[in-house]
Image (cartoon, rainbow, N blue to C red):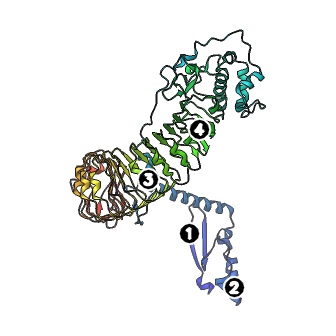
Amino acid sequence: KAKDKKRRVSSSGGFGDHFDFIEDGGSRYSNSQDDQKIEQDLNAEENDQSIHVISRKRPHFFDRIKDERTKRRLLLVMACLLLMLLSASLVVGVRRPRKSKVDTPPTKPKENDEEVNRNSPPPRPVPPPPPNGDASNGDDFVTDPDVPLLTEEDLKSLLGDSIIKKATLSDPDTAESKAFNWILADSISASLATDSSYGPAKVTQRYTIVTLFHSTSSEDGWLENDGWMTPTHECSWHGIRCGADDSVEDSDGMMDLDGELKDRVTYIDLSENGLGGTLPEEMGAGLEYLGQLRLYDNSIGGKIPKSLFQLSNLHTLYLDKNKFTGNISGIGSLLNLQNLDLSNNQLTGTIENAIGNAEGLTDLRLSNNQLTGEFPIEIVELQSLGTLLLDNNQIEGTLPSAMFSMPYLVVLRLHRNEFFGTIPDRYESNILEEIHLDDNAFSGPIPTTFGSPELRELYLGGNLLTGQIPQDLGHLENIEILRLDSNKIKGTIPDSIGSLLKTREIHFEYNELEGDIPDVISNLVGLQHLHLDHNKLNGDFPNWIDSLPFLEHVHLNDNMLKGEIPEDLKFSDTLGEFTLERNEVTGIIPQSVCDLSLILLSVDCSEPAPRVECSCCTCFR
């Protein structure tokens, strides 16, 4: 049988050599000089009844090639062929005019660009600095040359145990030790100490400011440090102002510039200044008249000192865009606090219930942290609150029924948390402009009571909402962005949507909507984004779609739309994305649409039986 299967194939190689190949049961033997030996081996196997041809162990192809030079040449040829195949596939991938994709079941996409598309939060309040507390306050301070410098015992006595026990004076590398030694050599501090009434307080203030400098100095140093660590009064140093502030009072009422506040720090703004390190615990002990502290957009880490929450005159605290960690207990003790921004840090823990004690809060921003725990119902007791931003945390629980009845609330952003339950249907506000509740786990129907005439943005996407789109949403005359995407909403799109004449974005994608795309959407002449994809819409292709002059995104894919694409379809040059794949629409994409060079243009144009003809589209089937 082995002889019957044996055949000889002769071929001439490209290198001038001649190879004889003998194939036996799928194995190949090379080199004509070994033919005689191979013949003997096969005859021997014929006579051996205990060995079957199909079970013998055959040598590898390269093992049968005796000539090493031939082996190398064969390997080189194979490597060249492999490189040619790879190069050809890359060229095809680059030059291929259209890309085909197989059908895949619709799944909810990750909204990776959600925060990019979302409008920025409203500008936060910027209270003015003390009216006359500019840098000139400390320039006219005159030291007494006859006053000796402070001794260590003198300075410890002036600072008191409340300061000294917090400082690590024994270590020369600590900020406290550096500040202590600097004060000992400072003539200004010695002169301040001679004030019989306020000497200790003024020295403590200077010590605290110097400690702040050493504690937050980074390797690259501050960007601006004019006046700092010079023999001038700290009121003239960059970012510091002294003098009366509208929120700073004593038992006798407002302090004037002729009183104690003339050289007391009431305002610090070192934002965007390259600060690093940590904040010293002494902040609260030495700056009791501080009304505004702005240190945002730096690289300060560590915990927020508890002493900051003991500053009874503090009304504006902006520490956002830093690297603070730990919890934020103590907000409720700041009874004069009006503006608090701790967003974009690494804060953890819960929002304390005592936050309801800060009755003067008008602007509260804790976004982009790692806060957990239940939403404190006491927040709705903040009757002056106008802006509440708690988005991008892990806060859970249900919303209080009075959430939409706070008298001054204008902006509410709670998106990307872990809220659940139904959305409150009690709605008494007439000034609420933004409601962002998307990417939570809210369930139940969409309330029909969203009735604020000022509502501009309604974000309810990425929840578990059911039911239908309320007809009453058509009463939102000022709505600009309406997002109901990625829920379980059924029914049809109400005709009342045609009344939303100021709407710029409609996002109804990833639901279970049926029926036609209402023609009344053509009334929304300012519409820029229309996302109706991944539903069950089964009407005709909207022939009016190109009449909207400012369209940028039109996503109609993954529905059951039918009809034919108009031959004269012509979008405005603002269009960047148009998706129509996985429908039953037929026709031709005109060349005028191709000429727009869209970022995304996709239809059902895959061979062999395309529904839509297109020379420039990404094709699906």
Residue at left offset 58%, top offset 23%: 264
Read off the residue under disc 3: 94
Q: Which corner quadrant holds the N terminus? A: bottom right
Q: Secondary structure at mark 1?
A: strand
Q: Earlier in the sequence, mark 1 or mark 2?
A: 1
Read off the residue under disc 2: 45
Q: Earlier in the sequence, mark 4 or mark 2?
A: 2
User: What x and y, as percent, mark residue 552?
Assistant: 32, 48
Read off the residue under disc 1: 11
Q: Secondary structure at mark 2?
A: helix
Q: Which corner quadrant holds the C terminus? A: bottom left
Amino acid on which disc 3 is placed: Val
Distance Cα–Cα, label 3 vs label 1: 38 Å
Look at the numbered discs 3 and 2 and tell me whether their residues touch, using CB distance below 8 Å.
no
Mark 1 vs mark 2: give the one in front.
2
Q: Residues within 10 Å of mark 2 (few under 14, many from 20)?
A: some
Amino acid on which disc 4 is placed: Phe
Q: Earlier in the sequence, mark 3 or mark 4?
A: 3
Q: Residues within 10 Å of mark 4 (few under 14, many from 20)?
A: many
Distance Cα–Cα, label 1 vs label 4: 91 Å
Name the foreground residue: 43 vs 598. Answer: 598
